[in-house]
């Protein structure tokens, strides 16, 4: 397996990263190919597709070969229910392969690293290696009626995000509009590690070169 | 990358195999895990999902390392238009990884090789190695509105399948109802290799231990 590309975005670490693709639809990433695969012909026709698949490596989740666990505790279930690893999208699986559906916003054919793919809604952290890129085929891959097991049984309620005026003014100076919107989408998804419920505790994520701090009480998240 | 499982079905070769998942929805396959990954706990909760992803190896399409071509000619376009390999699902890609969405019909927890997954609609030939199995998440992976590039621009017209009475009687003896239905779905998809239009020529595919022969004229396929 050869690394064909890497993704680049505002998430230097996995903390705060959306837990699935499409959860932060505004999050913009840039995919650049490795020199051996940097060829405009190789993406010819891709512009006709609105969505693409990324097959990538959970590069931060590497475990020693053979050290897999048959069960994991999905954060979606509060981290206290064990499910089979193949019934989840957990990174801790026998082969550390991730699969993400992202929107293809544009293909940059003129930059020095062209062709580069501009995508939104990815759940990959900055620098993640990519093994394959494929077009999304709605005719055979769109199943709105599919049963979604524990995911549907544990409906998600987004947090209410509060940004005090002074902090907002500062963020508006340092982030562009898309980045600020993305940050709000990220915070709505509750970026705390699982198993935690501590209203006084200050959490932090790194985003776009900034350290973002917040507290959470109930369904309210407040920047601080 | 470790092989975690293999798929088993009635297709000993790639000839006749559906070109995408879901094109032969009746085609039933059985997925058995390698001994090191054969663990009922590892699929706990998977029964709650109606569809699953298979990430697998194009094991018949191996090319020497580094021998990739930036463009391919999709059969869907008649085999005479070149598109970028990343704009297609061609097996001839830098990493020979396949991605298929299949329906999970049942999980066999009692056979000697349990747990085994019974799936329908796969496009993998018998014996194909599997790297990963993941639940399908309709909330983030179902996009009926997605633009599908050259696929949508080249709508598919199924062939009309004619089975002469004597051949049908023979097939009904040798195949069960599901296998016969699957065979018809396969033939409707036009299993000829691309670039060919020769009404007199007899084509053959191997299916369920039988050699199936047919001719095609226009949009009519006749067993012979």
Image (cartoon, coloured by chain):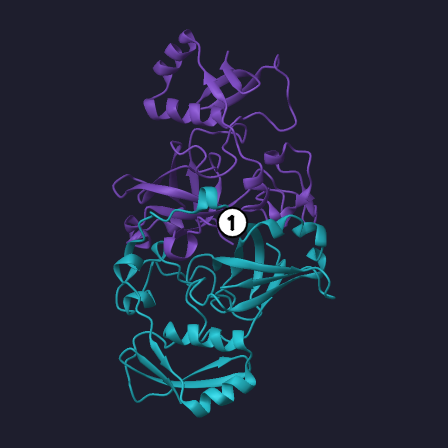
Chain colours: A purple, B cyan
Q: Residue furthest bottom?
A: B166
Q: Is residue B12 visible?
A: no
Q: Is residue B139 visible?
A: yes
Picture coordinates of residue A166 (x, y %)? 41, 7
Picture coordinates of residue A183 (x, y %)? 43, 24
The image quadrant where one finds the C terminus of chain B is: bottom left
**Circle 1 is placed at which residue position?**
B136
Picture coordinates of residue A98 (x, y %)? 52, 45
Which quarter of the figure has residue B131? bottom right
Q: Chain ID for label 1?
A: B
Tell me if residue A158 comes above or below residue B141 in the rendering: above
Picture coordinates of residue B92 (x, y %)? 41, 63
For the residue pair A1 and B183, the one nearer the viewer reads as B183
Q: Along the horizontal axis of the image, is A50 left or right of B7?
A: left
For the residue pair B71 and B65, the one nearer the viewer reads as B71
Q: Residue at x 48, y 43 (%)?
A: A129
Tell me if residue B62 comes above or below residue A163 in the rendering: below
Q: Along the horizontal axis of the image, is B160 left or right of A132?
A: left
Element carrying mark 1? loop
Q: Residue at x 36, y 46 (%)?
A: A51
Q: Residue furthest top?
A: A166
The image quadrant where one finds the N terminus of chain B is: bottom right
For the image shown, how many numbered marks are present on the structure?
1
Q: Along the horizontal axis of the image, is B176 left or right of B22?
A: right
How dense is the environment of label 1, judged by Cα within 10 Å: few (below 14), some, or many (20 and up)? many
Tell me if residue A139 comes above or below residue B167 in the rendering: above
């Amino acid at each position: 397996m050869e690394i064909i590309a890497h993704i680049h975005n505002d998430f230097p670490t996995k903390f705060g990263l959306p837990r699935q693709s499409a959860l932060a639809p505004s999050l913009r990433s840039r995919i650049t190919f490795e020199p051996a695969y940097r060829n405009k012909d190789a993406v010819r026709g891709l512009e006709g597709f609105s969505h693409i698949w990324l097959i990538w490596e959970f590069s931060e989740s590497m475990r020693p070969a053979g050290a897999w666990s048959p069960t994991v505790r999905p954060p979606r279930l509060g981290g206290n229910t064990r499910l089979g690893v193949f019934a989840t999208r957990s990174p801790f699986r026998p082969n550390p392969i991730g699969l993400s559906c992202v929107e293809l916003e544009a293909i940059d054919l003129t930059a020095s690293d062209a062709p580069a793919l501009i995508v939104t809604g990815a759940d990959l952290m900055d620098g993640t290696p990519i093994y394959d890129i494929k077009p999304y085929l709605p005719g055979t891959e769109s199943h709105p009626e599919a049963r979604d097991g524990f995911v549907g049984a544990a409906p998600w309620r987004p947090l209410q995000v509060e940004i005090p005026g002074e902090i907002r003014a500062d963020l508006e100076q340092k982030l562009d509009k898309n980045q600020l919107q993305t940050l709000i989408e990220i915070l709505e998804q509750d970026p705390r590690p699982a198993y935690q419920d501590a209203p006084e505790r200050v959490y932090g994520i790194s985003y776009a070169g900034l350290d973002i701090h917040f507290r959470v009480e109930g369904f309210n998240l407040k920047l601080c």
